[in-house]
Amino acid sequence: MTTNNITSYEYNNEKEITNSKIENNSACLLDLCKIVTILDIITVGALIIVNLLKLILKYS
């Protein structure tokens, strides 16, 4: 059975580093999410317009 000789200071330090990395990554992800959401809205809008035009041309 092995024992880990890690002090609580080292553990807390590692935890803080990990938390700050997660916060930085989530900030980047939030910005990306905003951009992707805007692009999704534009894409869906374009698809709706194209389909409406197809219907109008089909039945006119």
Image: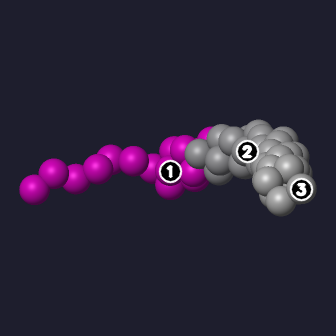
Residue picked out by circle 1: 11
Give how far across and how far down residue 26 sits, in percent: 72, 48
Mark 1 surroundings within 10 Å by alpha-carbon count, few (fewer than 14), some (14 through 19), many (20 or more): few
Q: Quadrant of the N terminus?
A: bottom left
Please check the rendered image and state whether residue 31 is part of the magenta-colored stretch, yes or no: no
Return the disc, 1 or 2, that comes first in the chain's sequence: 1
Q: Disc 1 on helix, strand or loop?
A: helix
Nearest-to-viewer mark from 3 and 2: 3
Nearest-to-viewer mark from 3 and 1: 3
Amino acid type assigned to the residue bearing label 2 in the image: Leu
Name the residue rendered at 33%, 47% in the picture: 5
Tell me if residue 27 can be seen.
no
The reply to whether dot 3 and dot 2 touch (C-beta < 8 Å) is: no
Residue picked out by circle 2: 29
Separation of disc 3 and disc 2 at Cα?
46 Å
| Horizontal relation, residue 44 to residue 49: left or right | left
Residue picked out by circle 3: 60
Mark 2 surroundings within 10 Å by alpha-carbon count, few (fewer than 14), some (14 through 19), many (20 or more): few
The answer to which of 18 and 38 lies nearer the viewer is 38
Name the residue rendered at 16%, 51% in the picture: 2
Residues rendered magenta in the picture = 1-17
The answer to which of 43 and 51 lies nearer the viewer is 51
Name the residue rendered at 59%, 45% in the picture: 18
Give how far across and how far down residue 3 sits, in percent: 22, 53
Amino acid type assigned to the residue bearing label 1 in the image: Tyr
Q: Quadrant of the C terminus?
A: bottom right
| Horizontal relation, residue 8 to residue 42: left or right | left
